[in-house]
């Protein structure tokens, strides 16, 4: 499957999600997985390199589209860490992938920004007859917060984008993972195990949705 992790806001956990997704596909599902880092900060690639995972850094829209489509037969999965802007590179990602996974942070929820993402996704879905599937989830959430409840209501009715049931909660162990050249999947603390279970549930839910037929 071809998966793009997108959002135009910084700090929502896009690169962290992409790296954990790639590791999960590679190590738990034994899939031959390539990560394409199209973010100018190259957060994913530095982290992935430290873990010995396969990646490429590509930020040119045309080259990125060609690479994703040309390599689709060579890899079981390709995960693209999108840039933090909704420009031509993000559009190229949406034109190429099967699933767009969108992390959103309840504390930073910007409905105008989310509407821009939804509009771009919807325009591409019209061209591609329903593809890519698009799913949004709440990341870095605080348990039992009013903001979390309000965010779920706000995100639950966006045309063309499914709000996933799984929420990933804010934990220091997730933020610490890149510095330890690790993911929460191969860390031993109780907090890491809780985070790993949330990621497993999230990715399973997202990929199951991504495999459904377009409406």
Image (cartoon, rainbow, N blue to C red):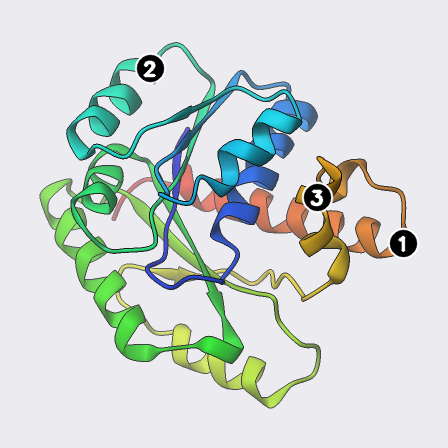
Direction from residue 13 to residue 134 in the image, left or right: left
Q: Earlier in the sequence, mark 2 or mark 3?
A: 2
Q: Which residue is mark 2?
A: 71
Direction from residue 106 to residue 110 in the image, left or right: left
Q: Is residue 3 above or below residue 175?
A: above
Question: Local crowd at mark 2 within 10 Å, few (<14), some, or many (≥20)?
Answer: some
What residue do we see at 46% from left, 24% from top?
77
- Whether pointer 1 and pointer 3 mark residues with C-beta atoms closer than 8 Å, the reply is no
Direction from residue 57 to residue 195 in the image, left or right: right
Q: Position of residue 155 (x, y in %)?
A: 40, 73
Considering depth in this image, is 30 or 88 the residue closer to the camera? 88
Question: Local crowd at mark 1 within 10 Å, few (<14), some, or many (≥20)?
Answer: few
Query: Residue 99 lies in what quarter of the image?
Result: top left
Mark whose residue sits in front, 1 or 3: 3
Q: Earlier in the sequence, mark 1 or mark 3?
A: 3
Q: The residue tagged with tag 2: helix, strand or loop?
A: helix
Direction from residue 3 to residue 23 in the image, left or right: right
Mark whose residue sits in front, 2 or 3: 3
Q: Is residue 53 above or below residue 60?
A: above
Q: Is residue 61 above or below residue 56?
A: below
What residue do we see at 18% from left, 48% from top?
125
Checking the image for residue 190, the label placed there is 1
Query: Residue 187 lies in what quarter of the image?
Result: top right
Q: CA gap, disc 1 to disc 2?
A: 38 Å
Q: Which residue is mark 3?
A: 179
Q: Position of residue 189 (x, y in %)?
A: 90, 49
User: Is residue 152 among what the camera can see?
Assistant: no
What residue do we see at 18% from left, 51% from top?
87
Q: Is residue 58 above or below residue 114?
A: above
Q: Residue furthest top?
A: 74
């Amino acid at each position: 499957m071809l998966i793009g992790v997108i959002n135009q806001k910084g700090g929502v956990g896009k690169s962290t999600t992409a790296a954990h997704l790639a590791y999960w596909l590679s190590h738990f599902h034994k899939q031959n997985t390539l990560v394409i880092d199209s973010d100018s900060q190259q957060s994913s690639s530095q982290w992935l390199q430290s873990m010995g995972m396969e990646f490429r850094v590509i930020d040119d829209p045309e080259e990125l589209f060609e690479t994703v489509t040309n390599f689709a037969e060579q890899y079981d999965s390709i995960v693209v860490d999108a840039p933090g802007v909704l420009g031509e590179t993000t559009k190229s990602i949406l034109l190429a992938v099967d699933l767009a996974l969108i992390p959103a942070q309840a504390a930073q929820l910007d409905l105008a920004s989310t509407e821009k993402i939804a509009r771009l996704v919807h325009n591409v879905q019209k061209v591609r007859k329903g593809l890519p599937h698009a799913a949004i989830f709440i990341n870095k959430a605080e348990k039992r917060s009013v903001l979390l409840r309000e965010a779920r209501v706000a995100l639950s009715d966006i045309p063309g984008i499914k709000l996933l049931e799984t929420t990933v909660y804010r934990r220091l162990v997730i933020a610490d993972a890149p510095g330890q050249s690790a993911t929460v999947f191969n860390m031993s603390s109780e907090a890491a195990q809780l985070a790993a279970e949330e990621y497993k549930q999230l990715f399973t839910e997202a990929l199951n949705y991504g495999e459904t037929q377009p409406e």
